Amino acid sequence: MRASPISATIDFEADGEQHGFLKLPHSHDASAWGAVMIPITVIRNGDGPTALLTGGNHGDEYEGPIVLSKLASTLKASDVTGRVIVVPFMNYPAFRAGSRTSPIDRGNLNRSFPGKPDGSVTEKIADYFQRYLLPLADYVLDLHAGGRTLDFVPFAAVHVLADAKQQARCEAAMRAFGAPYSMRMLELDSVGLFDTAVEEAGKVFVSTELGGGGTATVASVAVAERGVRGFLADAGVLSLHDGEHTAQRTTTLLDMPDGTCYTTSEHDGLLEMCKDLGESVEAGEVIARVHDMTRTGAKAVEYRARRGGLLAARHFPGLVRIGDTVAVVADVVERGIRV
């Protein structure tokens, strides 16, 4: 396979704090010899584990970009053992546009792995992470939220893996993140995910969903800030005695065991949620109604939970389309777990 066209302006092996770019040549109408410049920070202090921290995999999710930008500007080499690689705006074109996908090629980075060095801009970014950054990392944290179309209770997440030892390490890192909720997550389709690429490479991987609606809140940013430091402490990169940032707290363990967790709209219309995020739900209970937008006098369509549990996610906009995820109900496995 050909080499990546992306070049790094920093040295991954040098000690100290470095701030630079992943430079991807991109010729377009406004810049014949232009480039996509993806900001990156590397903080290294001798030998030790490497943690790769990413945000902005989708461009309309902001907790990751905020928290990782702050971390990149404040974390010092003397604070760490090993190396921290920080990429706050992973899909930089999407982030600049405030959109889930790239405005250049409509690429969804989190469905583009393993990527191609001679593919689209998004595929080239995926390829660089797959072949150049993942081999450097022992631990990977990818910060997500719901973007403009979904909203979640704040949780850190892992997937169920075939390797029991890897699964246990991922779950330990998830709990160390210390979000209010911790989720064993079932994906609708895992093909092309960054998650899948990291897990198949045998790394310790944690993802998150920390709210949504296309913005960040004081609370969601606070969860992310504490969580990043807890994750780094679990990785052995940051001191466990990092003050309040890694203070012990509790989490509620959730599980998504199968597809009955998902409720999908079969209609276009006006969405009325009947349960709020975090509320308990009984199997068969009405969790949403979709009202006809084309005429009055029509009866709303009721959507009922296919299982009991906790409402972990919901469609965010007031209008819904056929095929949209309306709600996700997760099993409550255990409450009050010390982390």
Image: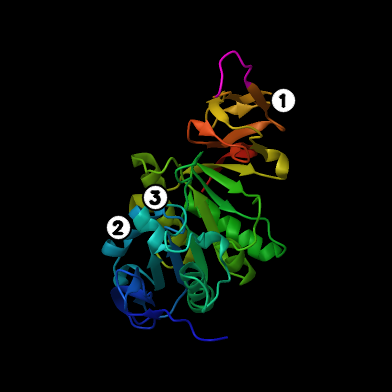
Q: Is residue 307 above or below residue 9?
A: above
Name the foreground residue: 193 vs 18: 193
Residue at x 48% of width, y 35% of height: 317
In the rendered view, would you say 11 is above or below 199? below
Q: Which residues are magenta?
A: 294-300
The residue that mark 1 highlights is 284
Q: CA distance from mark 1 to mark 2?
A: 44 Å
- Residue 59 in percent (x, y) is at 42, 55
Mark 3 residue type: Glu
Q: Of callouts 3 and 1, which one flags the residue occurring earlier in the amino acid sequence?
A: 3
Disc 2 or disc 3, which is closer to the eye? Answer: 3
Residue under label 3, please give it: 63
Separation of residues labelled 3 and 1 (CA atoms): 34 Å
Residue 26 in magenta stretch? no
Q: Give the CA separation, mark 2 to mark 3.
A: 11 Å
Q: Give how far across and how far down residue 73 sits, in percent.
A: 27, 63
* Quadrant of the snapshot with the N terminus: bottom right
Nearest the viewer among 188 and 178 is 188
Left or right of residue 216, residue 163 in this image: right
Q: Nearer the viewer, mark 1 or mark 2?
A: 1
Task: Give the number of the disc on residue 26.
Answer: none
Q: Secondary structure at mark 2?
A: helix
Amino acid, disc 2: Lys
Q: How many marks?
A: 3
Give the secondary structure at mark 1. loop
Residue 239 in view in this figure? no
Mark 2 = which residue? 70
Near-viewer residue (242 or 272):
272
